[in-house]
Image: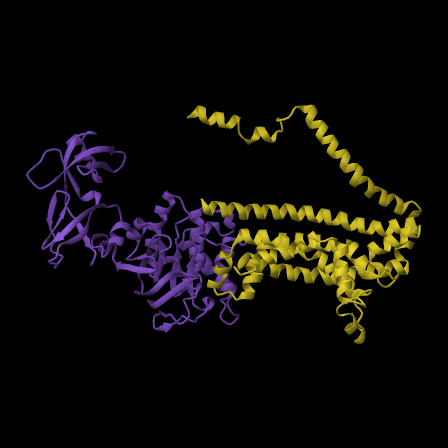
Chain colours: A purple, B yellow
Amino acid sequence: MSIEIRNISKTFGKFKALDDVSLTVDAGRLTALLGPSGSGKTTLLRIMAGLEQADRGSGQIFFHEEDVVDTHVRHRRVGFVFQHYALFRHMTVFENVAFGMRVQKRAARPTKDAIKARVHELLGLVQLDGLSARYPHQLSGGQRQRVALARALAVQPRVLLLDEPFGALDAKVRKELRTWLRRLHDEIGITSVFVTHDQDEALEVADEVVVMSQGKIEQVGTPDDVFHNPKTEFVMRFLGEVNTFHGRVDSGGVQFGALHASYPHTQRKIPGDARVFVRPHDVTIDTKSNGLPSMLAKVERVHSAGAFVRVVLSTETGQTLNAELSQERFTSMKIEIGSEVHIRPRHIRVFTETD
Amino acid sequence: MAGVVSMRHQSGPGRASQGKTEPAPVRWALITIALAFLGLFLVMPLVLVFTYAFNRGLGVYFAALTEPDAMAAIRLTLITAAICVPLNTVFGVCAAWSIAKFEFRGKNLLITLIDMPFAISPIIAGLIFVLLFGARGWFGPWLIDNNIRIIFATPGIVLATMFVTFPFVARELIPLMQAQGTDEEQSALTLGASGWQMFWRVTLPNVKWGLIYGVILCNARAMGEFGAVSVVSGHIRGLTNTMPLHIEVLYNDYQFTASFAVASLLALLALVTLVVKSVVEWKGAREHAQAVREAESEQS
């Protein structure tokens, strides 16, 4: 079921958490709301769920074609998974998952046997069937989150909403669980939206990423799209590390540091200030000049413990740069701390004030 | 690494819990003083109450309890508790709920107000009601015109007792509910529960032990309250005497055995309360520790 948000605003006192946000989430997709804290992503998710009310008269929310903005959370039929699981602590895993079915009106309530069958089916789906008699405090964080997911799915929700679902877990479990969530989503195909501040998580798991900042949506696109073609400076900075140069745009090119690059995106004839962004993995290091335009820099530090070697450099103007290169290349080049090297950005992105 | 690990074991909590921090004589001295003090000021009076109560035999003991004035006092005490405890339980749950789960103006004022009966001397609490409902009080003339008796009657006793016992339930529930937050309630709502279902199936079971503890304390105080009730009751034998007041009256009449017989009932109530309280406390502490542990593990 698709979700459509039209012109939703939300203010807390004087703080504008959401500023006229519109968004369409296609049916069956797994969408990530990505942004730093305070960007409004959780507020947007809670408004979709009905746990928070949008500002009076500010807009509409459609589930498929039905306007649900005035539908109480109880009747909205969303599956909501909380960051801190929010399992009912005095109920067993079985009772937790069965809760949503047991509170239904007598006429709509499944029979005892049907509830039992459904609970075991769901626990099987989240690979916890042996633990149905346990209490939440007897489970690990990852297991609790999977129970929360099974509980949310038990009421056959129209959409599944997850608030920082892996935020409270340690790094390793988090990685396992997000691949697992992706597989589960492919299996059941329910329209899902999850909130995260972790760009790796969003880029790895989601079909579509919605990047948010200060109550507004910065960009919507596939992970590839937002990572490789960031529309705004914010998206560029937020999705991975960047080196920033101050430069000037002139007709058909951009000048930064000692380099001049062609920059066909701009139509402007008047020279103007610009910021040039280079990702660390797009910086090429050479020990000798090979004739191509390059910058001179000194090697300050080297971190070689990892899949890639990170080299911290300082340019002639004193600016600090980060570069990332493969272990093979690093060993073949014999880079030493304090040595002078030539650096060359392979890809740049330029943002001017008017972009 | 192995060295570091074994060192940790040596200085671990096991050592401190064996209580080897003080020399043995100091420990024994402290324990002896504490026990002697408890024995002198708590156990001995309790034993004395029962000794005096029974020192002229079971017959006199039961005669003192079944005498009409004593029966009336017991009945009035039970009625008062039966009205005050449920009402204060409902009020306490409402107050704790609104304080723990909502943000609103005047929240701190409300918390302070809940504590007020603890801060005010019970005598003052009684006087407040005399000033309000007494013959020369604010509502006095109107009450007399309409032939309603509050002061020197059961309603006054109930009101004074309610005032004094108001904080017990709320005080127990507020920290517990605050530690638990609202996520579970919201979860219940997203799963289709009504507000009522959410309260009965999620909120109430989560605070069960704290609530029982609060109710027990509230009940013990409701039955044992003396000061506030003494002011509003008027000490009319067989009519407005509660058990504590009846005990005093008997004592002042030099009927020591009868007085201690009724007192033994209150003492028995206190003992039962203590036993139930420790069981509930033990269960509740586990639950609270768990809530705190979960809250902490979530923050890390």
Residue lying at 71% horizontally and 30% vertically, measured from the top left: B30
Residue A89 seen by the camera? no
- Residue A115 at what x, y percent from top left? 48, 62
- Residue B17 at what x, y percent from top left? 60, 31
Q: Quadrant of the C terminus of chain A?
A: bottom left
**Above or below, B103 relative to B267:** below
- Residue A48 at what x, y percent from top left? 39, 64
Q: Horizontally, is B117 left or right of A28 in the view?
A: right
Q: Which quadrant of the structure image shows residue B2?
A: top left
Q: Which quadrant of the structure image shows residue B31?
A: top right
Q: Which of the two residues, A109 or A331, is positioned nearer the viewer here? A: A331
Residue lying at 87% horizontally and 49% vertically, measured from the top left: B260
Residue A254 seen by the camera? yes
Q: Horizontally, is B86 left or right of A19 in the view?
A: right
Residue lying at 49% horizontally and 45% vertically, measured from the top left: B296
Q: Which of the two residues, B145 or B275, is positioned nearer the viewer here? A: B145
Most extreme residue toward the bottom, as rendered? B146
- Residue A261 at what x, y percent from top left? 11, 48
Q: Which of the two residues, B205 or A288, is positioned nearer the viewer here? A: A288
Q: Quadrant of the N terminus of chain A?
A: bottom left
